[in-house]
Amino acid sequence: MKFAAPLAVAAVAAALAAPASAQFAKAEDAIKYRQSALFVMGQHFGRIGAMVNGRAPYDAKAAVENAEVVAAVARLPWAGFGAGTEKGRDTRAKPEIWLEPAKFKEHQDELLAEVPKLLAAAKTNNLDNLKTAFSATAGACKGCHDAYRKE
Ligand code: ASC
């Protein structure tokens, strides 16, 4: 019992250090995982987009809630792009993702730099701030899609 906690910590650390591909039983699961995370992120980002574009009334509390989900879920998809997950299920991911991983990572980092700003902007309860941050975040989405997502 005394060693349970350190062992648990070591197990979690080992799991986090393992190659992303090892987190999934098969490539199909990794692809499904990344698609699901990106879908959930898109749904919540889209709800902010609706407010920003005037398709939905501005609701400051809803904007914060949606931005919180976006900020949290934005960390997830990338583990689903491990080696050997180029195919295994219908995917629009381009092969370049696995040929230029450093560049792909730059796009992830760009998104992960923007989403905390989106959340911070939502928390100001100011629609103009939200518009600015939404636009920057959408730019990060688009940059990666243009480079690495098939039509
Ligand atoms: C969205 C969404 C995306 C991005 C992208 C930005 O609302 O689902 O993937 O914005 O379209 O260009």
Image (cartoon, grey):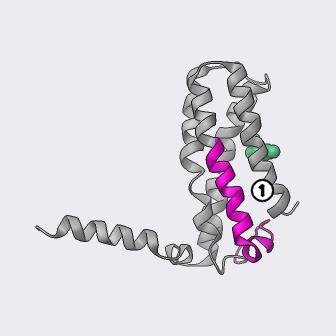
**In this orientation, does residue 27 appear?**
yes
Where does the image place residue 25, in percent across and percent down from the top left?
A: 52, 78
Query: Where in the image, quadrant-wise, is ligand 1 located?
Result: top right
Label 1: which secondary element? helix
Q: Main secondary structure of the magenta part?
A: helix
Q: Residue most toward the right?
A: 151
Residue 15 placement, left or right of 107? left
Figure check: 138 above or below 55: below
Figure check: 47 above or below 150: above
Looking at the picture, tell me which residue is in the foreground, 75 or 101: 101
Residue pictured at 73% horizontal, 77% vertical: 87
Q: Residue most toward the left?
A: 2
Looking at the picture, tell me which residue is in the foreground, 15 or 28: 15
Residue 5 placement, left or right of 36? left
Where does the image place residue 34, in percent across and percent down from the top left?
A: 63, 62
Give the quadrant of residue 45: top right
* Image quarter of the C terminus: bottom right
Where does the image place residue 102, in percent across and percent down from the top left?
A: 70, 68
Residue pictured at 80% horizontal, 72% vertical: 96
Magenta part of the chain? 88-114
**In this orientation, does residue 40 appear?**
no
Q: Which residue is mark 1?
A: 144
* Image quarter of the N terminus: bottom left
Figure check: 109 above or below 21: above
Where does the image place residue 111, in percent across and percent down from the top left?
A: 67, 49
Residue pictured at 62% horizontal, 74% vertical: 82
Residue pictured at 53% horizontal, 46% vertical: 72
The amino acid beneath tag 1 is Cys
